Image: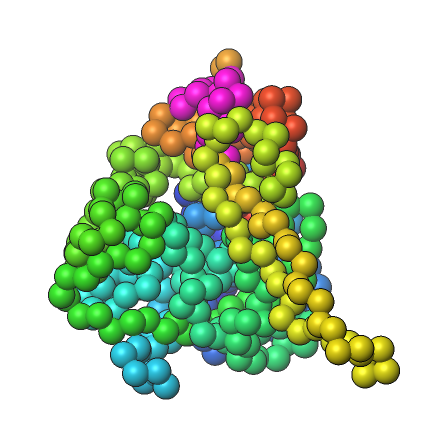
Amino acid sequence: MTEVEPVPLSQLTTLRTGGAPMRMFEATTSDELVATLREVWADDEPWFVLGGGSNLFVGDDPFEGTVVRIRTEGIERLPSPRPGFARLRVQAGHDWDALVAHSVAEGLAGIEAMSGIPGTVGAAPVQNVGAYGQEIVQTLVEVELIDESTGEVSTVAAADLGLGFRTSALKHHYGSVPARRAVILSVTLELAEVGHDQRPIAGEQLRTALGLGVDDTVTVAWVRDHVLVTRARKGMVLDDDDPDTYSAGSFFQNAVVSASFARTLPAACPRWPVTPDLDPVLVIPLSAFDGYVPPPAAIESDVKVSAAWLIEHSGVRKGFKLPRSRAALSSKHALALTNRGSATAAELAELARYIQGRVQAEFGLVLQPEPVLVNVEL
């Protein structure tokens, strides 16, 4: 366990905001991380863990608590019980894109569409990261984590993490606390062994993004390379020379709404059906069973709608900024709030509230922030 001199969090987050914490620790091994967290929790003070800092929006005032930087790294290949698959156990502090690059080099498929997403591996299940139709829930087997309430380390199956659209039982949603307060120590994924040959791409969303037809075949490396180019065009690949990348990625979530509400939105608004949760078990008490099994009730699927489209069609265009503000929408992507040069958290929050207000006024929908907010309010 190593205590280090606290530095302003503006130096460690991709939005480049945040004052210095009261205390700061760095952990480079899993055992060190466990020991550090147990000590911090014993002090009963505010805390949070910091990986790549790409999904945090931190306030300007000093943080009256402790920040634990997760610096653990390492990838271990394991056998899979399924033929044609391999498992990778990855330490929480490992760079996510470095993991994707490793998997592609090994001829493993399942996360290549998530190339270029900034941050660390341990943060990926927390918000069920995804891009172009791939989400970590599709390949996640289990995580090793430490619970704050007990200080115990356990292995938890992916099915027990409450993974949903950009959410999990571990995520600090704005205005609420997570269902389970815990820190991920390692992540295990199961990926398909596809090698380096060309193959068709199954996902329609990914094919559309890459301009591929149903019968087109490409290698997993080709997908990674073209996803990186596509993300870079949108300012979604970190680049010190490009202020459009001084962001937390998509600041607002694509909204998941009822089918009936979606019908109130303009037909031009992009939307995608969300598979409904169906209860596969119908229990009829034996005493009440008369030989008739009712058909399952028809359930309309919820709908995911494009937050970027809603923002732009509420009158807030790419590059928009409020007068005298150093915060602006990206000139390349309407979902990214960017720091154009020493912007304060207050300036970014002001812009976020303005955008929320415009979308609500035009479409009756309140967009929710995707990053975790620390020491700041919208």
**Near-viewer residue (319 or 111):** 111
**In x, y percent, where is residue 134?**
38, 56
Q: Is residue 47 left or right of residue 8?
A: right
Query: What residue span does the magenta drawing correspond to?
Result: 307-322
Tally the numbered discs: 0
Q: Is residue 165 visible?
A: yes
Q: Is residue 377 above or below residue 325?
A: below
Please tell me which residue is depicted at 39% across the width and 29% down the height of the picture.
330
Please tell me which residue is depicted at 50% across the width and 18% down the height of the picture.
315
Main SS of the magenta segment?
Answer: loop
Instruction: Report if residue 370 lies within the magenta region.
Output: no
Q: Is residue 254 above or below residue 21?
A: above
**Near-viewer residue (258 or 147):** 258
**In x, y percent, where is residue 319?**
40, 22
The outermost residue toward the right is 287
Q: Is residue 350 left or right of residue 234?
A: right
The outermost residue toward the left is 197
Quadrant of the image containing the C terminus: top right
Q: Residue 339 appears in which quarter of the rendering?
A: top left
The outermost residue toward the front is 291
**Near-viewer residue (106 or 14):** 106
Q: Is residue 194 above or below residue 203?
A: below
**In x, y percent, where is residue 107?**
20, 69
Please tell me which residue is depicted at 22% across the width and 59% down the height of the picture.
200
Q: Residue 120 appears in which quarter of the rendering?
A: bottom left
Instruction: Report if residue 316 lies within the magenta region.
Output: yes
Please tell me which residue is depicted at 38% across the width and 32% down the height of the picture.
333
**In x, y percent, where is residue 59?**
58, 39
**Near-viewer residue (187 or 191):** 191
Q: Is residue 224 visible?
A: no
